[in-house]
Image: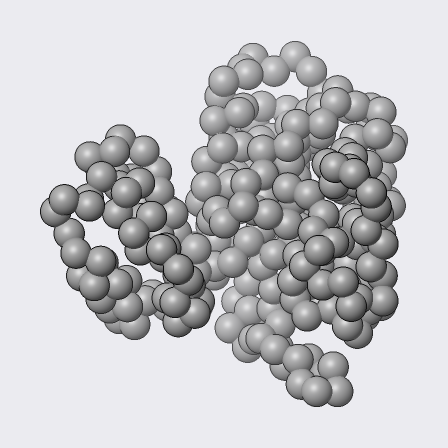
């Protein structure tokens, strides 16, 4: 097996830390005393197992574009890379986007359909503040803008095809800089919903998600996503953030995959 100096992870909140408080009713609930979450996140457990330094660039609520951008920037800022680097791209929801605010001169996450339909408190106000648009645009106008965008200009199949291209190009970029990279659907899922019996309804659009040309980690029994795999051993799981036990379970699975890279 190769020896690495760094294990670099880019992901959304599923890679930040375990969230045991999300669902205390789970069979695998094992909340530990004190602030120990970072010690039990899989990137730390896996880095310890690999004997290398952990670099966790994960952030809650971000998009796949954000994840690829920060990993690309990490490579660019550390060139020429004379250390052995293993990089993992933890994929998140397709419907998340970031936009560049010309007024604020920064990238800002857009408001996805789930947040709009759930009427998340202050989410539109927060977007206006981050983009410096508070003085110029009303909250209801921003809400209407995103509703129109996702209704008429968002197509899941096209987003999947775009993601295919981005992952293919990013792997080529990593190979150019002698970085071993692989992809894992940490939050991205081909599961649409579960019924009362725990049976899975698959999203038919994911037939267009092409993983054969990239280094793509699959869970046992050819399961594509972390969410679906957790459901196989804990029927009380309701698609919330993984807990400490889940991070402990995924670590040896990833290690076994890395051994074969």
Task: Locate residue 104: give its quadrant.
Answer: top left
Judging depth in this view, the residue of 99 and 183 nearest the camera is 99
At 49% from the left edge and 33% from the top edge, which residue is drawn?
A: 70
Residue at 61% x, 78% y: name it. Answer: 193
Q: Residue at x 54, y 24 (%)?
A: 75
Q: How is the image coloured?
A: one colour
The total number of labels drawn is: 0
Residue at the left extreme? 136
Residue 235 visible from this viewpoint:
yes
Residue located farthest toward the front when viewing the structure as drawn: 33
Q: Seen in the image, is 95 located left or right of residue 185?
A: left
Q: Is residue 15 above or below residue 222?
A: above
Where's the C terminus, which quadrant?
top right
Q: Residue shown at 22%/39% (left/top)?
A: 132
Above or below residue 197? Residue 237 is above
**Rendering coords of residue 194 (x, y %):** 66, 80
**Residue 149 seen from this side:** no
- Quadrant for the N terminus in the image: top right
Relative horizontal placement of residue 179, taking residue 116 as reference (left or right): right
Whole-percent x and y of residue 249? 84, 52
Of 37 and 68, the residue lying toward us: 37
Q: Above or below — where is 233 with respect to 102? A: below
Image quarter for residue 51? top right
Q: Pinpoint residue 94: horizontal percent, then vertical percent.
A: 47, 59
Image coordinates of residue 221 in percent, x first then y, are 82, 66
């Amino acid at each position: 097996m190769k020896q690495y100096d760094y294990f670099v992870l880019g992901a959304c909140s599923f890679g930040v830390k375990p969230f045991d408080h999300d669902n205390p009713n789970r069979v695998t609930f094992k909340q530990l005393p004190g602030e120990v979450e970072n010690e039990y996140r899989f990137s730390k457990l896996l880095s310890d197992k690999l004997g290398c330094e952990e670099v966790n660039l994960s952030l809650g609520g971000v998009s796949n574009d954000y994840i690829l951008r920060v990993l690309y920037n990490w490579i660019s800022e550390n060139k020429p890379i004379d250390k052995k680097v293993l990089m993992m791209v933890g994929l998140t929801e397709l419907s998340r986007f970031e936009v560049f605010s010309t007024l604020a001169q920064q990238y800002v996450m857009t408001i996805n359909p789930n947040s709009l339909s759930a009427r998340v408190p202050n989410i539109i106000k927060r977007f206006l503040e981050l983009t410096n648009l508070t003085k110029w645009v009303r909250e209801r106008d921003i809400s209407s803008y995103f509703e129109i965008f996702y209704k008429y200009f968002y197509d899941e199949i096209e987003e999947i095809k775009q993601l295919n291209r981005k992952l293919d190009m990013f792997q080529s970029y990593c190979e150019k800089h002698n970085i071993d990279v692989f992809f894992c659907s940490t939050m991205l899922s081909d599961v649409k919903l579960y019924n009362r019996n725990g049976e899975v309804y698959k999203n038919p659009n994911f037939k267009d998600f092409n993983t054969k040309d990239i280094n793509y980690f699959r869970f046992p029994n050819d399961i594509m996503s972390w969410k679906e795999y957790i459901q196989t051993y804990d029927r009380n799981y309701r698609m919330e953030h993984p807990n400490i036990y889940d991070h402990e379970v995924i670590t040896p699975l990833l290690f076994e995959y890395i051994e074969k890279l």
